């Protein structure tokens, strides 16, 4: 964390779950964390501004207000990213390292089951956790917070989607925190992401580089867009390919599969249109009835896609890469399982002529095959290292073939030390992937300076701990705003950086660049229109921020005893402290799980000790200001099981409440106690003892017996227990209520709250009339 003069807005954070004087959070990090506790939230801030630090702050606060021994799960798409999070959380959380555990596919399922139960802070790759939850190796009922890093991956069949659904179903009071630098451009994509993670759209918290509260923490980023022209030889080949493409498009139009009729069609149709048409044709093929022209349409559309790919190779990568592709096309066409489209194009005289010309150039005039962008790239790198020899440069390239060619040519320079960086998959004898250990070794050598140019495919966009880069070069352009933002985020974190985007004028390359830039602007615009931008948020005052992570008088968790991870000793009821958790209305869809294996509840031996009526408030932080200045008549213990979803249900019904450290589960109006027991804990003498000690403290005591997860050990046990409870409670001054459905607890609390409040209002009106 930088301590430069302009960064004076650091705030030291104190919380028993944070190491003393270790974490100095920036003001905007506190403000965002302040709004995310106990609410499903999405954080959208540029790479390098400390999303993980915010996640640490939210984690510490969530542990503080959750039942003892609650777990936190942190997920990320790759193992290197998981390891980064492990290091950060370990550095700042005041929790023994023995409670931390990384679980990936490399750990056997049997071991994962044991490790999950034995640890509190768990780091997962999403697919690993998904497999375990689907297989029911363990559940998420004791997880108070799930963190979804790189949350923009949440869509369709990706593991994040199912995990969020399972979590909400198993733990209605648990919280979800999504982290991303780029949620997507369209409103539909943003809404889909929020819907999949059960995040209300008013719980998105965004910062951009221009925001006043982050400007002092970012370094300047200069962005240059450099366009080049195709060579005359490239233009000649391009014209031939456009003619072939136009023939295929015209045929599809005559069959009625293209709505665009403007000639030439190749200037109006993009690759996305052809992919969509292919999907529709495949759907027609699987349907019933006549299929006139569909078979032919599929073949011609496949030809169009192949030619379109040739054009992209020519425009973006160069004729040398196109030559490799044509070699492969011709070879594949002679295979028995070759597609009809392959065979037709390989035998086309025009394609064969192009192939022959490129082979001649490769033998006698190889330089003419190199894309003009490469010459620009070479000059950029030479200039950079002449001016700043210790620079680090990351070059993003779309295709592995281009990565190999570029590295081979750059090695001829005396000052450029390039290295090939690709994914783990091996695609051929001449195109082997890198193992994870090889990737990490290359990144370490890049950091140390043995290599100064990393030429990489999209594998370097996210999920890897890559050293700070002085320059990021886009050798080719992607239309995705998400990938554009991820690539830019590799520079200007801790020092000034440059982004250089190379593109080919008057080609799809230029079109993709415009699409990506427009989508990025649209994303920020859509987020701001939803009143989500930082400058439009209602900012909490500084005193509340200071209180947010203030030092507690309770003891920090002990590393000697895992069972000591509690907020206060149960017997120390005289030191109960309360914390306001008045939250904004959350629109989460709650699914209620009714059939689970029973779990033993901890016995609250200190319930018989009388709790003082006056409670000391240690944190008046309002998460939403929704209920500001309203009296808070409901206190909920941190020990109340999260499965009831009580806090979120009260929030949705705009009923204010507080969280406090106490063995008393729920207190209403400082005079009504609701305590929850497992049915097998029913002992007449025990209930009488509790009542006799607390009857002076509370005017009404309600004992709830939780049958929601009850499994009978013999037939009719549930019915017999209920009858025993009802008979015992019918003549007693306290209430005994069995519940079978999770929602019942909320309705009991709500009815008592509403009835008592209405009665109090009537009494007040009556008293006022008498006074008058």
Image (cartoon, rainbow, N blue to C red):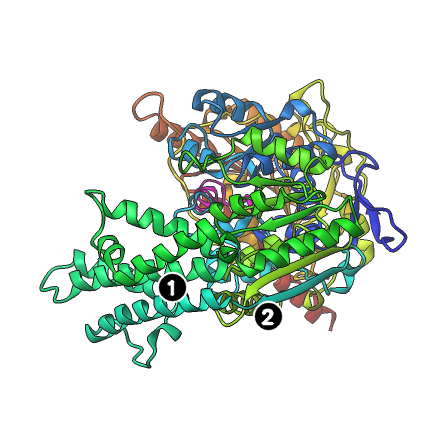
The answer to whether residue 550 is above or below residue 371 is: above
For the C terminus, the image quarter is bottom right
Q: Is residue 759 magenta?
A: no
Side of 284 where 552 appears, left or right:
right
Q: Residue furthest bottom?
A: 262
Q: Is residue 173 magenta?
A: yes
Q: Which residues are magenta?
A: 163-175
Give the percent coordinates (x, y) of residue 454.
62, 43
Residue shown at 49% from the left, 24% from the top:
107
Give the percent coordinates (x, y) of residue 724.
41, 29
Residue shown at 53% from the left, 58% from the top:
371
Task: Check disc 2 and report the residue beneath it.
Answer: 525
Residue shown at 44% from the left, 57% from the top:
313
Q: Residue furthest front?
A: 364
Between 443 and 327, the one nearer to me in the picture: 327
Callout 2: SS: helix
Give the percent coordinates (x, y) of residue 513.
54, 66
The answer to whether residue 433 is above or below residue 365 is: above
Between 256 and 238, the one nearer to me in the picture: 238
Residue 696 in sight here? no
For the N terminus, the image quarter is top right
Q: Which SS type dominates the magenta stretch?
A: helix
Q: Residue furthest right?
A: 5
The quarter holding residue 20 reads top right
Side of 651 where 217 appears, left or right:
right
Give the percent coordinates (x, y) of residue 226.
63, 65
The answer to whether residue 365 is above or below residue 296 is: above
Task: Check disc 1 and report the residue beneath it.
Answer: 271
The quarter holding residue 585 reads bottom right
Between 633 and 326, the one nearer to me in the picture: 326
Badge 2 crowding class, 10 Å Cα cut-off, few under 14, some 14 to 19, many 20 or more, is: some
């Amino acid at each position: 964390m930088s301590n430069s003069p302009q960064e004076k807005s650091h705030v030291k954070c104190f919380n028993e779950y944070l190491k003393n004087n270790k974490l100095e959070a920036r003001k905007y990090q506190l403000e965002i964390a302040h709004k995310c506790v106990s609410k499903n939230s999405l954080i959208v801030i540029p790479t390098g501004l400390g999303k993980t630090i915010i996640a640490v702050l939210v984690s510490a606060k969530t542990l503080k207000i959750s039942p003892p021994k609650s777990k936190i799960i942190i997920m990320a798409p790759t193992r290197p990213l998981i390891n980064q999070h492990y290091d950060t959380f370990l550095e700042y959380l005041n929790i023994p390292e023995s409670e931390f555990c990384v679980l990936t596919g490399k750990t056997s399922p049997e071991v994962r089951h044991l490790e999950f139960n034995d640890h509190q802070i768990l780091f997962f790759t999403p697919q690993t956790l998904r497999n375990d939850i689907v297989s029911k190796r363990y559940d998420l009922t004791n997880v108070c917070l799930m963190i979804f890093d790189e949350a923009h991956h949440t869509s369709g069949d990706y593991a994040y989607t199912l995990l969020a659904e399972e979590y909400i179903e198993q733990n209605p009071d648990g919280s979800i925190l999504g982290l991303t630098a780029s949620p997507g451009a369209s409103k539909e994509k943003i809404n889909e992401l929020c819907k999949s993670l059960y995040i209300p759209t008013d719980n998105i918290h965004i910062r951009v580089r221009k925001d006043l509260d982050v400007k002092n923490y970012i370094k300047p980023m200069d962005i240059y867009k450099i366009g080049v022209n195709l060579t005359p030889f490239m233009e000649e080949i391009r014209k031939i390919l456009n003619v072939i493409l136009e023939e295929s498009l015209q045929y599809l139009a005559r069959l009625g599969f293209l709505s665009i009729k403007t000639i030439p069609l190749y200037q109006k149709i993009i690759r996305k249109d052809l992919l969509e048409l292919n999907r529709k044709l495949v759907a027609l093929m699987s349907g019933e009835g006549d299929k006139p022209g569909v078979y032919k349409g599929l073949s011609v559309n496949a030809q169009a896609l192949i030619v379109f790919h040739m054009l992209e190779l020519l425009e973006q990568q160069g004729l040398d890469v196109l030559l490799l592709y044509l070699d492969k096309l011709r070879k594949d066409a002679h295979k028995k399982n070759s597609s009809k489209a392959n065979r037709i194009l390989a035998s086309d005289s025009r394609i064969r002529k192009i192939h022959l010309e490129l082979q001649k150039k490769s033998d006698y005039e190889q330089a003419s095959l190199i894309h003009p962008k490469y010459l620009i790239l070479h000059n950029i790198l030479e200039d950079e290292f002449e001016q700043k020899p210790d620079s680090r440069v990351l070059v993003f390239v779309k295709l592995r073939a281009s990565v190999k060619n570029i590295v081979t040519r750059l090695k001829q320079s005396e000052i450029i030390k390039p290295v090939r960086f690709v994914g783990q998959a091996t695609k051929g004898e001449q195109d082997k992937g890198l193992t994870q250990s090889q990737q990490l070794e290359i990144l370490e050598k890049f950091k140390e300076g043995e290599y100064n140019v990393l030429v990489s495919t999209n594998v370097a966009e996210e999920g890897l701990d890559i050293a700070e880069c002085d320059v990021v070069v886009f050798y080719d352009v992607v239309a995705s705003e998400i990938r554009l933002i991820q690539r830019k985020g590799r520079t200007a974190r801790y020092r000034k950086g440059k982004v250089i985007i190379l593109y080919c004028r008057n080609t799809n390359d230029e079109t993709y660049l415009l699409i990506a830039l427009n989508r990025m602007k649209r994303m920020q615009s859509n987020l701001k229109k939803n009143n989500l931008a930082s400058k439009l948020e209602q900012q909490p005052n500084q005193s509340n921020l200071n209180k947010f992570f203030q030092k507690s008088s309770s003891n920090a968790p002990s590393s000697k005893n895992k069972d000591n991870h509690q907020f206060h000793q149960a017997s120390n009821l005289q030191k109960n402290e309360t914390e306001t958790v008045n939250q904004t209305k959350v629109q989460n869809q709650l699914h209620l799980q009714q059939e689970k294996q029973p779990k033993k509840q901890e016995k609250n031996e200190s319930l018989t000790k009388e709790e003082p009526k006056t409670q000391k408030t240690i944190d008046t932080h309002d998460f939403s200001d929704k209920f500001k200045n309203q009296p808070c008549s409901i206190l909920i213990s941190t020990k109340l099981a999260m499965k009831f979803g009580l806090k979120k249900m009260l929030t949705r019904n705009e009923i204010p409440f507080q969280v406090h450290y106490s063995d008393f589960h729920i207190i209403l109006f400082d005079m009504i106690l609701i305590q929850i027991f497992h049915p097998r804990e029913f002992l007449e003498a025990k209930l009488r003892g509790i009542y006799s000690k607390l009857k002076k403290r509370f005017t009404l005591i309600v004992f709830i017996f939780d049958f929601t997860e009850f499994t009978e050990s013999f037939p009719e046990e549930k019915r017999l227990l209920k009858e025993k409870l009802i008979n015992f409670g019918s003549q007693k001054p306290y209430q005994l209520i069995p519940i079978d459905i999770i929602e019942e607890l909320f309705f009991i609390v709500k009815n008592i709250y509403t009835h008592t409040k209405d009665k109090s209002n009537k009494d007040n009106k009556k008293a006022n009339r008498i006074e008058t």
